[in-house]
Image (spheres, helix red, strand yellow):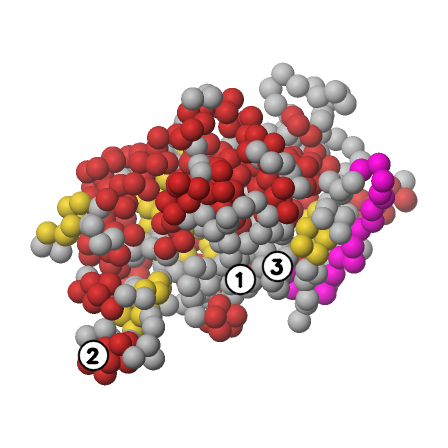
Amino acid sequence: MIEWPKSNDAIGTVNRGNPCESGLCTLCRADCKGKCETWMSSLNGRKVLYPRDFGNTTSGSANVTSLGLGYHALRIQGYAYGANGLNEGMTNNPDDCVFPNVNVETSFGQEVKTKCRVPIMTGALGSTFIASKYWNSFAVGSALAGIPIVVGENVVGVDKKSELKKGKIINAPELNRRVETFLRYHDGYGTIIVQMNVEDTRNGVAEYLIDKFGDKVIIELKWGQGAKVIGGEIQVKSLEYAKFLKDRGYVVDPDPYNETVQKAFKARAIVSFARHSRLGGTDLDSPEQVQKAFMDGVAHLRKLGFKRITLKTGSYGNEALAMAIRYSSDAKLDLLTIDGSGGGTGMSPWNMMEHWGVPSLVLHAKTYDYCKMLEKAGRKAPDISLAGGFAREDHIFKAMALCAPYTKLVCMGRAPMIPGYLGSNIEGVFKPEKKSELNGHWEELPASVQAFGKYPEEIFAAWETVKNKVGEKEMDNIPFGAVAMMGYVDKISCGLQQFMAGARKFKLSEITRNELFAANRETEQETGIPFVTTAESESAEKILKA
């Protein structure tokens, strides 16, 4: 098993817990005082791309492992000549071919194109309480950065203030808040996507959304995710809330109405209840039945008035992957998100996370194969978003290249949440009267934050950027977590521009699989990406033999 280093002395980052391939700790805490790479990027932006203490240090690469199968075993090609995809009006002279001129904007969709400033989107932020607590930071940050944000499943069902009539939602305050918070700062880039699972479908979430928000919202069907093979879960510590959720139709474990369970809860032998969602497709027996049910569901959503529809699927095997790609193509969906095992979660059974499903790299490699197969058969492959353990700009480049030209976005779950936590903790120190509302955890700024400064304008590298965008008066309404997210996206964007410039690709559509080579033979075999010593060998030999 590969052990990822807990610290990087060159850029001054340290993981509090055990790191995974993404660079995040396996357990990411909202009260964390630092300082993993994503945490640092939230405050210091693009400066984290470079080694620290310039003028007093030199730095060398750490021992980059080439063992095992994973995105770490893909390496990025650079080229010694050429310039591809320059913006209109630019020429291939060295003054134009600089990395700040790389265009990292993307778009996805069929009839309606959704533009994004950076090719990233959030994972589904659903009924987990951490998503609700920090939503203002996540939503405002995503809107300002111009990236899509996803409202996950079950938000309506777990909302105590939501109202249902004859089993259908007629008022959903929490869902309203989530959509309206994003739309307040939406400027045409990015979008808000709302997921639907079995319970959401029963509750009439789609009908409610189209009546309330029209085509401002994208609806997303959900088959699964890379962290678990069963439905979504949350944990509640109130017996009354557990009963409320069971009355709403959810599976609650243990049963809060069971007298033995109630006695155990009173004695504190049981201190919490897990709420589970249902499995979809249990009444279907074959791919043909899945296809019919899927197409009927999409037709119903289009009849309601949804112009943009997407699908999120998890790390199932080849058959389900093929179904997701083919049926998304047939239904002309706007985006298909494919989430590999190795991704993150709010609450999933731990050993299920560790042992179920297809790892991201091989799932994504198969995605390319199947999209290519569709095209050869004369069908249009769907626009793809890849998910499952991404946090850095190198991850984004590799994912975009591995499944090029089909990849339009990279979906990141836990990473863009870190700026929300961090900013809220800092804001709570400066606004102690709002600390509870902000869900801040700190009484004072820790040394790790004070190293950046003593006041917000000094601490956040993105402060002036956000102020310039929204105006000085509006800054009073901007969560610090949103400012932190802008810092993180700035680092991601700049780092991606640098990789692309080195590969001589000045816009995303120019990236191909040729920009990658494999660091070991196993990765070559499973992805079709050539091993480092064989990549470009034909061209090299031609030069030598000329």
Residues at marks 2 and 1, CA–CA distance in whole angstroms: 33 Å
Secondary structure at numbered mark 2: loop
The residue identified by callout 1 is: 27
Residues at marks 1 and 3, CA–CA distance in whole angstroms: 9 Å
Q: Which mark, residue 258?
A: 2
Q: Quadrant of the C terminus?
A: top right
**Type of amino acid at the residue the image marks with label 2:** Asn
Depth order, front residue of 240/148: 240
- Residue farthest to the left, as pictured: 166
**Local crowd size for mark 3, using a 10 Å CA cut-off: few (<14), some (14–19), many (≥20):** some
Q: Are marks 1 and 3 in contact (CB under 8 Å)?
A: no
**Closer to the N terminus: mark 2 or mark 1?**
1
Does residue 378 show up?
no
- Residue farthest to the right, as pictured: 545
Residues at marks 3 and 2, CA–CA distance in whole angstroms: 40 Å
**Closer to the N terminus: mark 3 or mark 2?**
3
Q: Are marks 2 and 1 in contact (CB under 8 Å)?
A: no
Q: Which mark, residue 478?
A: none
The vertical placement of 449 against 263, above or below, is: above
**Type of amino acid at the residue the image marks with label 1:** Leu
Residue 34, percent across and down? 60, 51
Q: Give the residue drawn at x 70%, y 56%.
A: 7
Between label 1 and label 3, give the one nearer the viewer. Answer: 3
Secondary structure at numbered mark 3: loop
The residues colored magenta run: 54-71
